[in-house]
Image (cartoon, helix red, strand yellow):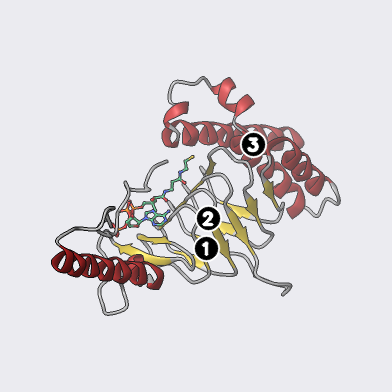
């Protein structure tokens, strides 16, 4: 291909990548909806990191020494996002807030993926070869989540904030907790005797509950013997469910 033509093609590819990155930010960050392109490009660290990686990755594929790593090192210093130049990133990836995101060398990320701050797509040991996750299209990974090893996150899956995922995740599932486990698959709670991972037994809470009940019984006994109810109140112990942790 003639150098002039190559330059035009390069410019078109770069323009498209920038346009897609800005659109992804506007679509997936409510705070960016009203922002101009320049504001997003100049102030969104996650967008800057993804765009810089597009350049570094091309250089890395052409076996250019040092420069791809140097680019991503500078990106890490300025944005707090560390992406290995060899990692494969799909189109319209959006990294919201950015800081603390780490994407390892053999990670593969699909199209339209959203990562929040503090997400790690990391390896589990010192093994060589494929050792980082493969993330399907339209996956959302919540802040602080760690996805470790060569696991596959199925398309459309959601990984809850602060989860630690070490097993494959089915498509369109929601996984939460440590270790990450499905709490929704295709919008429905998983069925089966061992499926209710979200409400694991809590022996300490159970022991406190039994003690509270025992004290209540003893106080009733004291009252029936003396005619006086001991001062003070043992509150009934009830499991409380806070507001939904969903958000973004
Ligand atoms: C997982 C998440 C995407 C919600 O997905 P969802 O498919 O809509 O799931 P739901 O909200 O219906 O939650 C399913 C269950 O998982 C629980 N859950 C949700 N997120 C959880 C989390 N991060 N950790 C532990 N449990 C969680 C819910 O309480 C609910 O429990 P229940 O089955 O007892 O009702 C969302 O909770 C989340 O973590 N989003 C990340 C947002 C984020 O990182 N924002 C950063 C902005 S700066």
Mark 3 or 2, closer to the camera: 2
Q: Residue furthest bottom?
A: 193
CB of mark 3 near ligand 1 (< 8 Å): no
Reading the image, the residue beneath label 2 is 145
Residue 164's disc is 1
Residue 19: image location, x then y, percent: 53, 31
CB of mark 2 near ligand 1 (< 8 Å): yes
Q: Are marks 2 and 1 in contact (CB under 8 Å)?
A: yes
Reading the image, the residue beneath label 3 is 9
Residue at the spot 83% in from the left edge and 45% down from the top edge: 67
Graded by Cα atoms within 10 Å as few (under 14), some (14 to 19) or many (20 or more), the crowding at tag 2 reads many
Left or right, 12 with respect to 114, comes to right
Residue 67's disc is none
| Residue 200, visible in the rendered structure | no
Residue at the spot 18% in from the left edge and 70% down from the top edge: 221
Q: Earlier in the sequence, mark 2 or mark 1?
A: 2
Graded by Cα atoms within 10 Å as few (under 14), some (14 to 19) or many (20 or more), the crowding at tag 1 reads many
Left or right, 76 with respect to 170, comes to right
Foreground of the two, 170 or 119: 119
Q: Earlier in the sequence, mark 3 or mark 2?
A: 3
Image quadrant holding the C terminus, namely top left
């Amino acid at each position: 291909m003639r150098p002039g033509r190559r330059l035009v093609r390069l410019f078109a590819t770069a323009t498209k990548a920038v346009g897609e990155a800005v659109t992804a930010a506007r679509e997936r960050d409510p705070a960016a909806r009203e922002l101009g392109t320049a504001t997003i490009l100049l102030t969104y660290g996650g967008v800057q990191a993804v765009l810089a990686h597009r350049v570094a990755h091309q250089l890395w594929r052409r076996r250019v020494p040092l420069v791809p790593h140097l680019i991503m090192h500078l990106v890490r210093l300025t944005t707090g996002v560390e992406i290995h130049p060899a990692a494969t990133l799909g189109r319209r990836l959006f990294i919201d807030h950015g800081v603390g995101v780490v994407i390892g060398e053999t990670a593969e990320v699909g199209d339209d993926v959203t990562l929040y701050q503090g997400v790690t797509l990391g390896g589990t040991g010192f093994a060589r070869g494929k050792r980082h996750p493969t993330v399907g299209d339209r996956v959302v990974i919540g802040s602080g989540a760690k996805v470790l090893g060569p696991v596959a996150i199925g398309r459309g899956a959601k990984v809850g904030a602060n989860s630690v995922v070490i097993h494959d995740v089915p498509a369109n599932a929601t996984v939460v907790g440590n270790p990450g486990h499905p709490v929704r698959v295709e919008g429905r709670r998983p069925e089966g005797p061992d499926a209710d991972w979200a409400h694991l037994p809590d022996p300490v809470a159970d022991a406190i509950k039994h003690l509270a009940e025992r004290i209540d019984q003893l106080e009733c006994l004291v009252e029936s013997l003396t005619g006086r109810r001991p001062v003070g109140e043992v509150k009934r112990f009830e499991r409380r469910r806070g507001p939904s942790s969903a958000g973004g």
